[in-house]
Amino acid sequence: MMDIEVLITRQTKLRHHFDYKDPVLQDSNMAAKTKRRTTRQRRRLYFDATYEEPDIISGNEAPTPPVPSRPVPTPPQVQVVAKKTSPTYRRPGGGTQVSADVEKHLDSFVDTFTTLGVEGLRKQFREELASYRAPDDKYKFRAFEAHPDKNRYMDVVCLDDTRVRLTLNVPPATDYIHANWVKFEGHDKVFIATQFLEDGKVKCSQYWPMESGKYHTFGKMFVNTKKGDKLDNGPIVMHCSAGIGRTGTIILIDVILRRLFSRKEIDLVDLFKKLRNQRASCIQLEGQYVFVILSVLDYIK
């Protein structure tokens, strides 16, 4: 009997040559990919079963919940049951189409962090990252010290090296704002990480109509919206109360996901340090650090 892999390879070459889709071969490939996705889901559940949900909204970790009575599932071993021949597939529900190489990269990521586990991540944060700050030559914040009235928290500094400089009415107005540029090599998105506006005060009311052709009148003032332009290539502004905890968490999640689907190396510790080198004190709590990985695992399950 002909070896099954040789047979599949030959069928694949013929299928590509004649653009013919063999239903038997497609079913075999889809079964293998479905099994890999199911394996990732089960490993994610294993990771989740040992995770204590942090209170991300308030910035404080929730108290430790009681130990679950159900047994913790053991992560299964990945078994390849058929040779991959189709270069891409579409995730259920019309998700992103990814290549077989990306699938392997995702599996490797899941293996790494389910092996490390929640306690491993917590220990890593406590021992290596909690007290980390930018090198001395970059850990300078003179503009921050010169404008105490523009800082929401005096213990959350704004680094000079990456700070956002305002240009409108400068001078006489100052160019200082408590915000930093955050960029990663090979990453097509640029972020601005900043604190919340003026201690929760409303900056301004919505005085212009959102739809084109609509108008508002305010006494003798007439405001008309003629058109609206959507800018897709500008920086992404991320903020929370201080602009470091939840803000840093979301930025790191985005960076990891984009690197994963581009088959780039994921060095979590290095990415964390590069984040703090640009925006001081980003990701304050070990619960937020664990939440980063939990969110990525949930997205790719």
Image: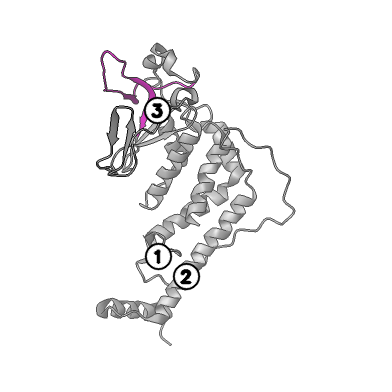
Q: Amino acid at mark 2?
A: Ala
Which residue is label 2 attached to? 32
The vertical placement of 71 against 27, above or below, is above
Q: Residue at x 45, y 64 (%)?
A: 93
* CA distance separating discs 3 and 1: 44 Å
Q: Residue at x 45, y 22 (%)?
A: 198
Magenta residue check for 28: no
Q: Residue 64 is drawn in which quadrant?
A: top right
The vertical placement of 197 against 23, above or below, is above
Residue 97, image x, y percentages: 37, 61
Q: Which residues are magenta?
A: 156-182
Q: Secondary structure at mark 1?
A: strand
Which residue is label 1 attached to? 90
Q: Secondary structure at mark 2?
A: helix
Q: Amino acid at mark 3?
A: Cys
Which residue is label 3 attached to? 204
